[in-house]
Image: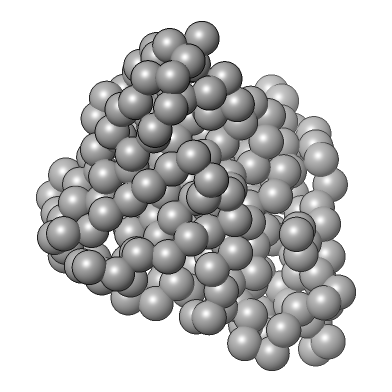
Amino acid sequence: NAGVTQTPKFRILKIGQSMTLQCTQDMNHNYMYWYRQDPGMGLKLIYYSVGAGITDKGEVPNGYNVSRSTTEDFPLRLELAAPSQTSVYFCASSLTVITDTQYFGPGTRLTVL
Amino acid sequence: LAKTTQPISMDSYEGQEVNITCSHNNIATNDYITWYQQFPSQGPRFIIQGYKTKVTNEVASLFIPADRKSSTLSLPRVSLSDTAVYYCLLLNNAGNMLTFGGGTRLMVKP
């Protein structure tokens, strides 16, 4: 199993541009999550999904959108990128409930200039 | 919205036992205490989880007193490769506010 994969690894955006961060898991996990981590800080939950077709907001959802059309994929969409969205983005998945072990991807480092 | 408090940093030497304490005075009945480890430029990795008393696995031990208002992660005989950030979280099945907080930066020295 590849686990949780994320693309791209790095990206530089200009203010106002849009992009989609891709996340795929091959473990047949129902739960998937998107976090952001600012330098020297902990992770903050952006959005999460408990299954295909179901998504919910986390602590910091503003400026982002998600969709979950399949069990495997959970893309994160940034509309109108702002410098405040410069961060490292991590995708994670867990088998069932939130208290199950979360498996994290390698992260996407995004810079907005 | 941080529900846990941990020391910002700790130093240790190879071969020593390291204990990292986390305070969670407002822990809810259905909260599970969970610890993750994060190396630079990597996503966090699960270490251990417990509800009460003591839990031990091949990596660490987790001590939880009866009132559950704190917990202690114990790493036996640390090595240089244990240098990382350690996060204490409270997780429950109704929680959508998963917050990792700042974590504890452990530096293991030769």
- Report if residue A22 is visible in the image: yes
Q: Which residue is drawn at 49% across and 40% down?
A: A63
* Whether residue B44 is situated above or below residue A37 in the rendered picture: below
Q: Where is residue A70 in the image (x, y as percent from the top left)?
A: 13, 60
Q: Which of B48 and B91 is in front in this view?
A: B91
Q: In this view, does A41 lie to the left or right of A78?
A: right
Q: Residue at x 31, y 27 (%)?
A: A19
Q: Residue at x 63, y 80 (%)?
A: B31
* Whether residue B103 is situated above or below residue A84 in the rendered picture: below
Q: In this view, does B68 lie to the left or right of B75?
A: right
Q: Which of B24 and B83 is in front in this view?
A: B24
Please tell me in which quadrant of the rendered image residue A76 appears: top left
Q: Is residue B48 left or right of residue B28?
A: left
Q: Where is residue B83 in the image (x, y as percent from the top left)?
A: 62, 33
Q: Nearer the viewer, residue B11 or A77?
A: A77
* Whether residue B81 is situated above or below residue A103 in the rendered picture: above
Q: Which of B78 and A29 is in front in this view?
A: A29
Q: Position of residue A17 (x, y in %)?
A: 37, 19
Q: Position of residue B88 (x, y in %)?
A: 67, 58
Please tell me in which quadrant of the rendered image residue B55 appears: bottom right
* Whether residue B73 is situated above or below residue A110 in the rendered picture: below
Please tell me in which quadrant of the rendered image residue B13 appears: top right
